[in-house]
C-alpha cells in the first residue's frame, strides 16, 4: 500500500511532457533494438542500437525544438527520452535472456 501511494505521488509530479519523451524513447529503442537483432542476432549490438536510437531520436527532437521561436534544446527532455530507451532495452535483454534459458531447459 505504501509503495502504491509513493508511486502515485511520484507519477503526479512528473510533467506530462517528460512522460511523452519517455514513451517516445521506449518506442524508438524498441524499433532500433528489434531491427538490429533481426539482422544480426547479436544481443549486445541490439542493446547498443536500442539505446542509441532513443538518444538519436531525443537529440533530433530537441534540435528541431531549438529552431522554434521561444524554444530551446532541453537536456531534461533528452534525458527522459534516453531513459525510456535504456529502460526498454534493459527489459528486452532480461526477457530475451530468460527465454533463452527456458528454451535450453526445454531442449534437454
Image (tube, rainbow, N blue to C red):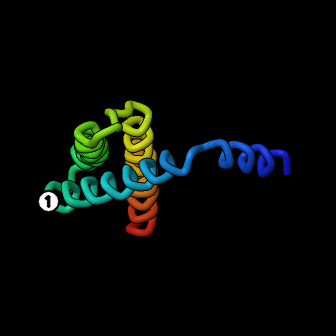
Quick one: which residue is furthest to the front in this view?
69
The correct choice, above or below, for 68 with respect to 33 in the image is above
Residue that lies at the very extreme toward the bottom in this rendered image: 106
- Give the camera-side residue of 90 and 19: 19
Q: Which residue is mark 1?
A: 39
Please identify the residue farthest to the left as the structure is shown: 39
Q: Quadrant of residue 70?
A: top left
Where is residue 81, by image quadrant?
top left
Please report the residue visible at 46 percent of the width from the left and 53 percent of the height from the top.
20
Task: Give the answer, above or below, for where 5 lies relative to 83.
Answer: below
Find residue 45 and report its horizontal and vertical position in percent.
Answer: 21, 44
Q: Position of residue 35 (x, y in %)?
A: 20, 60
Image vertical order of residue 12 relative to residue 66, above or below: below
Q: Quadrant of the C terminus?
A: bottom left
Determine the secondary structure under disc 1. helix
x, y (%) of residue 100? 38, 58
Q: Can I make out residue 52 in this image?
A: no
The residue positioned 45% from the left and 46% from the top of the image is 87
Amino acid at each position: 500500500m505504501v509503495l502504491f501511494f509513493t508511486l502515485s505521488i511520484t507519477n503526479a509530479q512528473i510533467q506530462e511532457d517528460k512522460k511523452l519523451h519517455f514513451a517516445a524513447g521506449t518506442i524508438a529503442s524498441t524499433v532500433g533494438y528489434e531491427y538490429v537483432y533481426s539482422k544480426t542476432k547479436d544481443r549486445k549490438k541490439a542493446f547498443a542500437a536500442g539505446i542509441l536510437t532513443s538518444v538519436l531520436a531525443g537529440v533530433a527532437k530537441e534540435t528541431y525544438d531549438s529552431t522554434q521561436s521561444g524554444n530551446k534544446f532541453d537536456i531534461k527532455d533528452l534525458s527522459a527520452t534516453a531513459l525510456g530507451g535504456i529502460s526498454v532495452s534493459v527489459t528486452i535483454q532480461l526477457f530475451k535472456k530468460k527465454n533463452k534459458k527456458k528454451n535450453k531447459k526445454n531442449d534437454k
